[in-house]
Amino acid sequence: MNIKYQKLFKQEEEEGRFWPSFTDLLTTILLCFMLIFIIMMVIKSLQIEEMKKTLDQIMGVRAELVKQLSDEFSDSAYGIEVDEKTGAIIFDTEILFAYDDAELKTESFAFLDKFVPRYLDVLFESGYEEYVAEIIIEGHTDRDGDYLYNLELAQDRAYSVASYVLSDDFPYKHLQEELESKLTVNSKSFTDFRMDEAGNYSAEASRRVEFKFRLKDEEILNKTRELLE
């Protein structure tokens, strides 16, 4: 009888020793997970902070580029406009094209020979080339005609400009290789029309070609979103 109770007591004692050990194991595992989580949060926090610093730097680059472009073309005899927010260079299509035509005027070649090197010097020769992801030549039209017609007209005009500055006739060959790696052409048809000073639709102001740049901030913003997710 005593032997039976001794066995039962021994079994209960062994079970009593087992459960605290199992609890200790679970506690250790939980602590490990918490430690890993804290480490991951610290790493992510540092990465996000680094991204913010980079974004601030790029925003500073954009502001400086806009300022330099404004200074460079403030005395232009061609009435070039620089968008104060984006740095887009805007000039009406009459400088380059006849009405409803996508073939460059004879006098437009001299204009592009002067404008393009000055524009690219600001973007490439001022230490900002590593920040520039894309250079866009964008065509815009007035509302005459339907959307698709004007979409094609604006695209053809943008392509004509790009085709010339990348051709053998363009005198600044040293700029072409860098330009080829970043240049795209785009058409907005008449969707981004412009207004006059009185706030009325202006067909003349809407007919234009824009030179725009895109910095690498979009790629960095996407990475930041990934981190936040």
Image: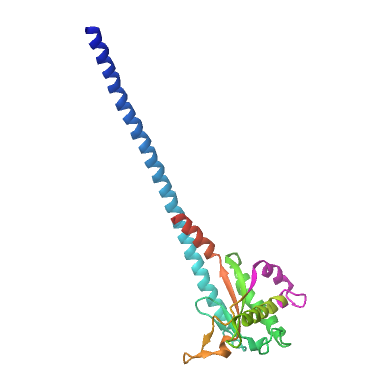
Query: Is 157 drawn above or below residue 11 in the view shown?
Result: below
Quarter of the figure that contains the N terminus: top left
Residue depicted at x 32% and y 24%: 18
Q: Is residue 93 left or right of residue 65?
A: right
Q: Quadrant of residue 17?
A: top left
Question: Farthest residue in the bottom direction?
Answer: 198
Residue depicted at x 75% and y 75%: 167
Tally of marks = 0
Query: Is 125 drawn above or below residue 25 in the view shown?
Result: below
Which residue is at the front of the view, 219 or 139? Answer: 139
Q: Is residue 173 left or right of residue 10?
A: right
Which residue is at the front of the view, 23 or 45? Answer: 23
Find residue 130 and report its horizontal and vertical position in percent: 60, 64
Find residue 121 and report its horizontal and vertical position in percent: 64, 74
Q: Quadrant of residue 205?
A: bottom right
- Tell whether position 179 is magenta: yes
Q: Is residue 125 in view?
A: no
Q: Quadrant of residue 69?
A: bottom right
Find residue 34 and report its horizontal and vertical position in percent: 37, 42
Find residue 204 and report its horizontal and vertical position in percent: 58, 90
Q: Is residue 226 left or right of residue 106?
A: left
Query: Is 222 drawn above or below residue 70 in the view shown?
Result: above
Question: Farthest residue in the right direction?
Answer: 168
Q: Is residue 154 in view?
A: yes
Quarter of the figure that contains the C terminus: bottom left
What is the magenta range? 164-185
Residue depicted at x 61% and y 67%: 129
- Tell whether position 220 is magenta: no
